[in-house]
Image (cartoon, grey):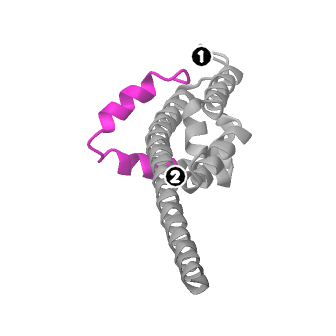
Amino acid sequence: MGMIIFIVIFFGIIALLVIVAFIGSKKDKQERLIENDKKRKISSKAERSRIIIFISLDKLIKDINKELKNFVPSIGIKSLGDINREYSNKIKNIQNSVDLKNVYDDPDYKLEINNVVNNLSKCKPSSWEKNIDVQFSINLIKAKANVLKKNEKYNEYVKEGNNKKWN
C-alpha cells in the first residue's frame, strides 16, 4: 500500500513538472513574439524616418549650395550670417525632430545618421567645403539619396519630408 502511494505521488510530481515546463515554454514563446513585433514596428518606423531625413538633408544641402553659389557680398538680399543661421536652425530642427528620435530607437540606423547630423551641425554651412568630416557626410547623404530615388515610394517620402517643420 505504501509503495502505491509513493508511485502515485512520484508520477504526480513528474506530471506537474511537465505541465509547468509546457506552460513556461508557451509563455516564453508568446513573450518572444511580442518582443519581435515591437522590434519590427520600431524598425519600420525608423526606416521610414531615416529615408525622410536623408531626402530632407539632400534637399537642404542642395538649397544651401544654391544660396551660397548665388551669394554676393554686400549686394545680395541675405547676408552670409543669415544663410548660416537659417540652415543651422533647420539642422537643429532635424536634430530635435521626432523622426530622428525614431531612427535613434533602432541601433542599426543610429550610428549611421547620428554622425552625419552631428557633423553638419558642428560646422557653419558656409564652411562645409573646408571640413573633411562634413564633406564625407554630404557625400554619404547624396549617395543615400540617389539610392532612395529608385524606391517606389520616393515621391511619397519627398512629400512627407516637405511637410516637416525644418523645410
Look at label 1 and name its amino acid.
Gly
Q: Which residue is at 60% across, 81% downward? A: 6
Part of the protein shown in magenta: 141-167
Q: Which residue is at 29% across, 39% downward? A: 153
* In magenta stretch: residue 166: yes
- On residue 6, which mark appears? none
Q: Write down the quadrant of residue 85 in the picture.
A: top right
Indicate left or right for 166 with 95 as reference: left
Tag 2 secondary structure: helix
Tag 1 secondary structure: loop
- In the foreground, 5 or 77: 5
Q: Which residue is at 37% across, 26% downward? A: 159
**Residue 43 in the image, given as x and y percentages of width and height:** 48, 48
Instruction: Give the CA separation, mark 2 to mark 1.
Output: 56 Å
- Figure label count: 2
Q: Is residue 4 above or below residue 149?
A: below
Q: Nearer the viewer, mark 2 or mark 1?
A: 2
Residue found at the far left of this picture: 152
Look at label 2 and name its amino acid.
Glu
Circle 2 residue: 35
Circle 1 residue: 76
- In the foreground, 119 or 27: 27
Q: Is residue 149 above or below residue 22?
A: above
**Residue 73 in the image, given as x and y percentages of width and height:** 65, 22
Residue found at the far front of this picture: 1
2 or 1: tag closer to the N-terminus? 2
